[in-house]
């Protein structure tokens, strides 16, 4: 019998086969767990590579916020007394020529100056509006007539005393009163004034208690002396005692003006008429909404006349 070659253990043979396969495959035999570890490392490596070449996302840097603009009231229209007079004359001409769209308003204040005069001037300035003041010569605040004039407003003569029994006692008494108020005003503003408003208006009847027919005579003699007199066709109703609320004064003025082309509004500048001051912004705004241009009364303004009732 031939001698048999020695047998190797089965485990050794398996190890030799595995090693040979690994050599032929060009890789070392895997150790337990190395396959899963290698695969995980590759994935992580690819992820790292992708992150490296990825363009960074644009990061928007917030811009510093700009401060909100400060809220301010709308400025009053820039104008001058000369421009107002020219515009008023142009509107009056349009009305005279039949232009029904033309409208003009004259704001007037009787009996001042007073403790409220400066506030009235401020309210008018804030709205870019000029008015006409009919002055009472013996007012405790008569020096404020210069403030009124310097601000560009119209100046008229009302009375020196506002005492009906005294100024309507006779024609001569009226002209003496008129001369006194003229002196009180012209000495302070440096010029004479040529427009007037009769206390109580041309249509007053109280004058009949002192001189029969005096108003019918004065409407002739006053213009003959070089003056023009002005009444009104709308009243704020602030002559009432006690003074009405500001809302009522505004409603009276706006309601009275509605539908008219030419308006002359009567109001009062006295210390007790505080609600008149308070009503002014609403009156001015409301008249503007109705389409009115604001004017200053002069000797050449087409007059507003009542009929004489005495």
Image (cartoon, rainbow, N blue to C red):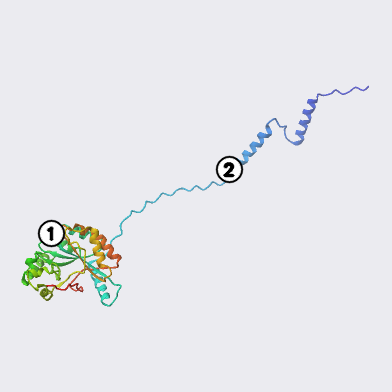
User: Against 32, is 46 above or below?
Assistant: below
Q: Which of 12 and 290 lies nearest the eye of the viewer? A: 290
Q: Residue 153 appears in which quarter of the rendering?
A: bottom left
From the image, tell me which residue sits under label 1: 141
Total marks shown come to 2
Q: Provide residue 119's location: percent of width, then percent of height.
A: 20, 58
Classify residue 107 by image quadrant. bottom left
Residue at image coords 77%, 33%: 21
The nearer-to-camera label among 2 and 1 is 1
- Residue 34: percent from the left, percent from the top? 68, 32
Q: Quadrant of the C terminus?
A: bottom left
Percent across and percent down for residue 8 are: 82, 24
The residue lying at 30 percent from left, 65 percent from top is 289
Let me know if residue 77 appears in the view.
no
Q: Secondary structure at mark 2?
A: helix
Figure quadrant of residue 263? bottom left
Q: Badge 2 is on which residue? A: 51
> Callout 1 environment at 10 Å: few (<14), some (14 to 19), or many (20+)?
some
Q: Is residue 93 left or right of residue 28?
A: left
Residue 97 in the image: state x and y as whole percent: 27, 77
Residue 136 position (above or below residue 22) = below
Instruction: Tell me if residue 281 can be seen.
Output: yes
């Amino acid at each position: 019998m031939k001698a048999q070659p020695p047998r190797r253990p089965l485990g050794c043979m398996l190890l030799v086969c595995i090693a040979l396969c690994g050599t032929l495959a060009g890789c070392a035999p895997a150790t337990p767990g190395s396959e899963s570890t290698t695969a995980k490392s590759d994935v992580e490596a690819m992820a790292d590579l992708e992150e490296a070449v990825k363009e960074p996302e644009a990061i928007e840097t917030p811009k510093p916020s700009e401060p909100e603009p400060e809220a301010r009231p709308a400025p009053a229209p820039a104008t001058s007394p000369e421009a107002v007079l020219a515009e008023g004359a142009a509107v009056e001409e349009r009305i005279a020529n039949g232009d029904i769209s033309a409208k003009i308003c004259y704001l007037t204040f009787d009996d001042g100056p007073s403790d409220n005069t400066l506030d009235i001037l401020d309210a008018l300035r804030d709205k870019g509006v000029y008015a006409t003041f009919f002055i009472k010569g013996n007012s405790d605040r008569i020096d404020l007539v210069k403030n009124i004039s310097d601000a560009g407003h119209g100046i008229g003569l009302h009375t020196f005393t506002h005492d009906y029994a005294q100024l309507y006692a006779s024609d001569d008494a009226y002209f003496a009163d008129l001369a006194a108020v003229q002196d009180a005003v012209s000495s302070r503003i440096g010029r004479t004034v040529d427009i007037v408003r009769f206390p109580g208006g041309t249509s007053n009847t109280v004058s009949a208690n002192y001189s029969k027919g005096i108003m019918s005579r004065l409407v002739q003699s006053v213009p003959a002396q070089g003056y023009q007199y002005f009444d009104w066709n709308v009243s704020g109703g602030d002559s009432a005692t006690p003074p009405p609320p500001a809302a009522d004064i505004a409603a009276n003025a706006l309601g009275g003006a509605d539908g008219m082309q030419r308006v002359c509004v009567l109001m009062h500048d006295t210390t007790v008429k505080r609600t008149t001051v308070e009503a002014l912004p609403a009156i001015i705004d409301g008249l503007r909404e109705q389409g009115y241009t604001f004017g200053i009364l002069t000797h050449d303004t087409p007059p507003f006349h009542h009929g004489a009732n005495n």
